[in-house]
Amino acid sequence: MDIGRIATNLFAGWFQMGKHFPSATLDTIAKTVAEGEGTHRGELRVAIESRLPFPAVAANVTARDRAAMLFSHLRVWDTDENCGVLLYVLLSEHRIEIVADRGIAKVVAPAEWEAITSHMRDEFAGGRYREAVQTGVAEAGALLARHFPGNGDPRRNELPDRPLVL
């Protein structure tokens, strides 16, 4: 068991979640998600988690594992065109994971997702939490618009646009 990781998840600034992501910020991010989804056929879901629960840390669940669990639990995989994307942020461990459904994973290279997470990390490092998530949402939207452009027809919104805060 990694004592440092346990301490990070128990005591890191999880209590500052409301400060970093107040309701107005979540509204702004939701608007950015909605605007992006107007340009492509993808579905983007954002999940921001302050910390992992102790049992998950003790079981050595990684941020990637947790993102995959949430991808399933939130049914991001259950979109008409298999074009759901989960943008997951684990604040306590400073981890960002992007999980894409199989329809997207076939055409988008992992390096393209890594570039997005790198830009987000730069924003987070500067203490710009809202900007970090908005950067990820905007860049993921641009990537989806390139690979899954909209056809101009109105479409059903299959996943909530507002970030889920855990």
Image: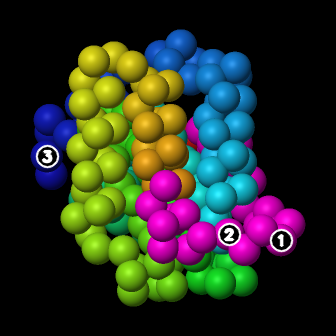
Q: Amino acid at mark 2?
A: Gly
Q: In the picture, residue 76 is in which quadrant?
A: bottom right
Q: Sequence-wise, which precedes: disc 3 or disc 2?
A: 3
Confirm whether residue 150 shows in the render.
yes
Q: Are marks 1 and 2 in contact (CB under 8 Å)?
A: yes
Q: Residues within 10 Å of mark 3 (few under 14, many from 20)?
A: few
The residue sitting at 20% across, 40% down in the picture is: 5
Question: How far apart are the alpha carbons under marks 3 and 2?
Answer: 46 Å
Picture residue at 66% right of the left edge, 29% below the top: 28
Say which residue label 2 marks: 150
Q: Nearer the viewer, residue 125 or 111?
A: 111
Q: Residues within 10 Å of mark 1 (few under 14, many from 20)?
A: few
Is the Cβ of the residue at disc 3 closer than 8 Å to that at disc 2?
Answer: no
Q: Which mark is residue 2?
A: 3
Q: Which residue is mark 1?
A: 153
The residue shown at (41%, 32%) is 132
Extent of the magenta region:
142-165
Type of amino acid under label 3 = Asp
Look at discs 3 and 2 and give the one toward the viewer. 2
